[in-house]
Each structure stands twice: as structure tokens, then as C-alpha cells.
Amino acid sequence: MTTVLRASDSAQFLSIVPALAGFTPRESIVLLPFRGSRSDGAMRLDLPDHVIPVLHYATAAVDLVVRVPGTDALAVVVYTDTPAEQTPDGLVLPHAVAVDTLLGCAEGAGLRVVEALCVTPEGWSRYEDTDPVLHPLTDIVPPPGAAALGDVSGDQFSGAALPSAPAAEARQVARILHGLDRALGPERTTRAGEPQVIAAAALLDDIPAFLESVLEASDPLPPLTAAALVWCLGRPPVRDTAIAQWATDHRQGIRTMEAQLAFTAAGAPVPDDIGRVFLGRGTAPDGERLRTALRAVREATARAPREARPGPLTVAAWLSWALGRATHAGRYLEMAREIDPTYSLALLLDAMIGGAVLPEWAFRGRRGE
């Protein structure tokens, strides 16, 4: 069922933005692409800093908006903790230069400007007013029906922290992981009397089947499953198979596993269509499948020893990015780099996200949404 929220003025429009974004932004510029009088999504960007020229920032922002099919208009909302400045010439809203530049780029791209608003701790205002005034935040009242879309009171970082993990389960996962390293490593020295390690190793007899079973596992993951998953995501060929399989299906996972093994063994090229999935191109993934995989990876990572987390954290970053949650993805990559600053996939993903690269399907919707 689709919930339609309507706004008749600027204050009502501001009340809808968190519902469209899925959270209440902080220190952000939110771009809302419009088709006619309708918008069904929002893009959040960090506020511009002094490192990137304002024109470059504004041009990149508008380039993202025009990639959404059918977009003919744009709304801009700034959320900032910086107060407006009262000068002898009147009220000056924070980030006014950046917004003015952005609106100029939007008009140059043929986009109509629907709204340009600023929300500060003291109140909200319009950038395009000749003499801006601050209106009370109490004007911004959630519209009827907004509650059906879930809790949006948290900011863009809400939900990115790893879930809590019982200490006993974390110790159990660590023991199984060490056992798997011995059992499946070059020396294969599993000792008798380690039934959990033997059981975890048995799960990995058919890795694509195991990766598929993770999507149906209980929440939270049993320690045995969590350990096997962390072990998988710490090995690049299996890690990359997991990404491709969860974004497609079991059959494609088998094909990706075979391609990864051929590349590792003999340097055989990986088929282009597999690489396209990683780059966010091609058929849009099933959103629920990605979310289920992300929940499992987060649960497993929370129970893993610190040194085993870079691989799972990077997979969590890719899944978040594929779901359009670039802020969460950036947080997971930051956590991975804190452990291993040289982890190659984390560096690659960080470059993609830092360059404002989004999956193609982010601009045309995902299945299962």
C-alpha cells in the first residue's frame, strides 16, 4: 500500500521531508526531485565544506537529481545547527551562497525550483524570500498518515551502529572462527573433540547454498552460523560471491563462485555482468533480500573478534550503499579502516561513495520496495 502525504504550504512540506528521507536529517542538504507536483524520494548530502568549491558541489548535486527519470523540478532543504545571522541589512540564512549556487545550477539544467528552505535550531525560513524571517519550529507538524511510514525521529546515522552481542556468544564465535582457520587452512589440522568447528565446516561444503540459507536463518543468527558467515566474508572470493548472490539469486551465486575460483587459480577474467552488479548496474536487486542480508551481516559482525571484522563490515557497506543508505555505508567503511587502513575493497568503496557514485537502480527504484 502506498501512503500519499500532501503539503499545502512550506511548513507542511517540511513535515513531509523526514518521511520521504526515512529519518530527520542533521547538518545536511536534502534534494527532492519532482515530477510535476509529486516527489517520492529524497537525496541527502553532507553540507558543503571549504575543501570542495561551491560550484563543483552544486553541479554534482544537480547531476544526481537529473538522473532520476522524469524529473522536471527540485526542492532543497538545508538542516543545520548553524544559526541564522542577524545583520544591519536583515537576516542571513546559513549556507545561503551554496544554496543560491545550487538553485542557479538547477535552473540552468531546466529544473523548476519548488522550495528552498532552511531549518535551524531557532526556526525555519525560505531562502528565496527577499527579507527572510524565522518561523517557529512548532509550525512543522507531521501530517496525517506519516506515522504509518515508521519512526523518523533519528538522524541519518541512526541504525548504523552494530547491534549488541552477548559476551558469551562473541567468545563462542571467536573459538569457532579460530577452529575454522585450522580446519580449512593450508595445514587442515582440526583436532578431534571440536564438534562445533566440524559442524561449521560442514556448512561450508556448498558455499552458495550456505549464503542462501543465511537469508532464512533466525534473527539473531546462531553463533555457529555467525562464525561461518564471518569466515566466508573474510575471504575475498567468497565475500564477492556473497555480494553478487544476495544482489541477484542462488544460481548467480554459483556462477560467481566458479568465476572467482577460476580467477584465483588461473587469472581467468571475471564476466562483465558480474562486475556490473558490484558497480550497481543492471537489474535492480530485491530490496527485501538486501535488507535481510544486511541484518545477518550486522549480527555476525557484532559477534566477531575485532580483527575479523573488515570483510563483513565492507559487505555491510556495499549492502547499505545498494539500498541507498550511503551514510550508513560510509560509517561501516570507517569502522573497517579503523581496523585495517589498507583493506582494498573498503578503499575502493570509499572512493566510489566519496565521488557521489550511486547505484543505477537508486534512480529508478528497486524490486521489493
Image (cartoon, rainbow, N blue to C red):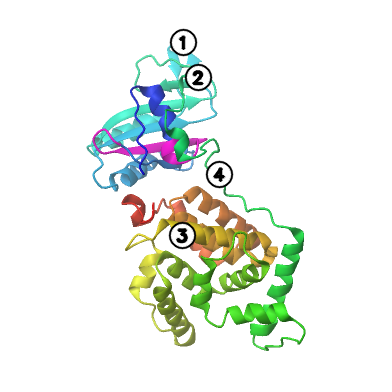
Q: Tell me the residue at 34%/40% (across/down).
A: 40
Where is residue 189? Give x, y as percent: 71, 88
Q: Tell me the residue at 52%/71% (across/down).
A: 213
4 or 3: tag closer to the N-terminus: 4
Where is residue 330? Give x, y as percent: 53, 52
Q: Which of 344 and 40 is in front in this view?
A: 40
Residue 175 found in image quarter? bottom right
Examine the rendering and report whether any part of residue 19 can be seen: yes
Q: Residue 290 — which label?
A: 3
- Left or right for 205, reference 262: right
In magenta stretch: residue 330: no
Residue 96 found in image quarter? top left
Where is residue 78? Give x, y as percent: 44, 31
Residue type, label 4: Phe
In magenta stretch: residue 29: yes
User: Between marks 3 and 1, how big is the CA–CA gap?
Assistant: 53 Å
**Residue 84 higher or lower than 313, as above or below:** above
Q: Name the residue under label 4.
A: 157
